[in-house]
Image: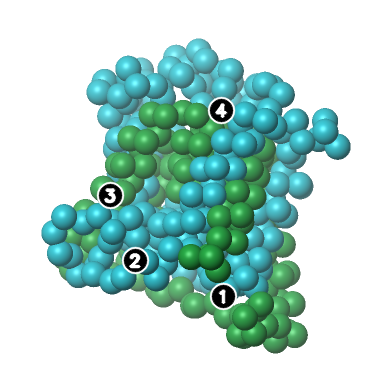
Chain colours: A cyan, B green
Amino acid sequence: MFDFLMKPWPWYVAGPLIGLLVPLLLWLGNKPFGVSRSFKHICAATTPIKIKFFDYNWKDHIWNLLLVGGVVLGAFIAAHFMNDGSRVAISENTVADLKALGITDFEGLLPDDLFNWSNLLTGKGIVFMIAGGFFVGFGTRYAGGCTSGHSITGLSDLQLPSLIATICFFIGGIISTYFLIPLILK
Amino acid sequence: MKKNLKYLLVGIYFGIVLVKSEVVSWFRIQEMFRFQGFHMYGVIGMAVIVGAISLFIIKKRHMKSVEGENMRMKPKRFHTGLVIGGLLFGLGWAFTGACPGPIYAIIGSGTTVFLIVILSAISGVWVYGLIRKKLPH
């Protein structure tokens, strides 16, 4: 058991554990499983000027902010106390492709070549962190949900709009992966 | 506040699963978009299957929440944003290697530079709120 807690979890364990969040949140208080709306509530709580989209009482949605606060805590616990230091066991083909793009650090969850403070204001940092984050935020709100809201909750509920959104998430990701990322890293 | 604390526990559970399953790894997302491994498809696929079976049972048996309400899902709407927003989201997902849940989890796991990623994401939502009247929906 201890060994299991320390090692990375396979997809057939992790997938069902994530899927159970859909009925769990409904059962606990009729809440839809979704993460991205927390960004909207943070905007509503902090916007310096009045914008109609954010003009509501964000405190009514405090449950969602507690959920994402919990995610930060849970990730801290997992990374510090449930970690045997093993590398992310991605396919050899992916390692080879990423090496060809100049990625050298395969130790942690993400490559230090791209994600660190000293890279932040370089071209790479601006695209991978600043623009990347901006697109995730703008895109998720425009699409009305993210991977949890559309791809997991929406698909579980057999919602066609969520299928369209999920397909577009993947097309966007493929465009970045095959065209934009090589262009920037080369 | 007290009655909302249970959501903090649910979040802790979700955060642990996100890290333990390596869904928060940029490498896993690259492997997924390059179609070179099954892991991410397995995680998302199993999550959807378990979610769908649960919802099917909930609807069939008219099950109620702890508060005694009927459990209900809001239907999603069709609009242009699904496509344009979805594509932009996908671009960002591949760059950062993180969708919103993992952005929070990566901060928790100790990669502090993701504080900038989350600030950018929140700015993205804010700009959307600012210009949404001018966008096709």
Q: Spot the residue most to the front.
A: B2
In the picture of the structure, the residue carrying the numbered disc 3 is: B124
Q: Residue at x 57, y 36 (%)?
A: A76
In the picture of the structure, the residue carrying the numbered disc 2 is: A58
Q: Secondary structure at mark 1?
A: loop
Cα distance, mark 1 to mark 4? 34 Å
Tell me which amino acid carries mark 2.
Answer: Trp
Mark closer to the observer (4, 2): 2
Crowding at dot 1, Cα within 10 Å, few <14 / some 14-19 / many 20+, comes out as many
Q: Secondary structure at mark 4?
A: loop
Cα distance, mark 4 to mark 2? 33 Å
Tags 4 and 2 on a common chain: yes
What chain letter is assigned to the residue under label 1? A
Crowding at dot 2, Cα within 10 Å, few <14 / some 14-19 / many 20+, comes out as some
Asked where in the image residue B31 lies, by quadrant, the reply is top right
Can residue A154 be seen in the rendering of this structure? Answer: no
